[in-house]
Amino acid sequence: MEYYDLKICGLTRQLPIVPLGPKLKIASFNLLGDGELVEKVAEELEKKLKKEKFDYLVGPEVKVVPLVQVLAKKLNKPRYVILRKNIMGYMTRPVTNKSKPTLVLNGPDAEILRGKKVVIIDDVVSTGRTIRVVQEMMKIIGAEVVSAVAVIKQGEKEEEIEVPFFFLGVLPLFRG
């Protein structure tokens, strides 16, 4: 197997290069289970987000969850919200979006976010589609997105994100 050495926040991680199609491969980045990396990334993002005026962190499930939790603690935000990919049995009055990917917000979480300022947190951004869908959800429920952040920007494509967007590291796409 081939690997890509990612250097980020003073750490190095060997990422497996995996195929997405016959002529495209990516270095697979995953925060889950890497507490050291989550902590270092959260420290760097905390420095950038301390200047932002916002009420809540929001993010899509699942790989970004440990980062959102650690970051919320560092920023003294006792509550954060994770959007799910499916309606879950515990949800009441779930809110869904119209576009793909489909995301779901529990009704009580939607009420908490209504009228509030939020920052979107994601692990990897390639096209910006997931961030745009989270923005769509925030518009549906009446929350204002003030910025979006990611650990990694993957590929050369310029994202079409309507709010200030920053990231900590870059991963190339492997073609051919």
Image (tube, rainbow, N blue to C red):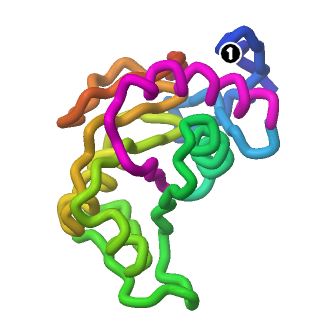
- How far across and how far down the image is residue 139, in percent? 19, 59
Name above or below for residue 59 compared with residue 67: below
In the displayed structure, does residue 145 sit left or right of residue 110? left
Label 1, residues with CA under 10 Å away: few <14, some 14-19, many ≥20: some
| 45, 162: nearer the viewer | 45
Q: Is residue 175 visible?
A: no
Res 104 → quadrant: bottom left
User: Which image quarter holds the N terminus?
Assistant: top right
Residue 136 % position (x, y): 23, 57
* Quadrant assignment, res 116: bottom left
Q: Residue at x 57, y 54 (%)?
A: 78
Q: Residue at x 37, y 42 (%)?
A: 119
Question: In this view of the protein, which residue sits in the foreground, 143 or 51?
Answer: 51
Magenta-drawn segment = 35-60
Q: Position of residue 25 (x, y in %)?
A: 57, 30
- Which residue is pictured at 77% across the width and 20% down the height? 13
Residue 57 forms part of the magenta stretch: yes
Q: Amino acid at mark 1?
A: Leu
Whether residue 63 is visible here, answered yes or no, is: yes
Which residue bears the numbered disc 1?
6
Q: Is residue 90 above or below residue 154?
A: below
Instruction: Name above or below for residue 168 compared with residue 94.
Output: above
Q: Secondary structure at mark 1?
A: strand
Magenta segment: does it hold 58? yes
Residue 174 higher or lower than 124, as above or below: above
Q: Nearer the viewer, residue 106 or 50?
A: 50
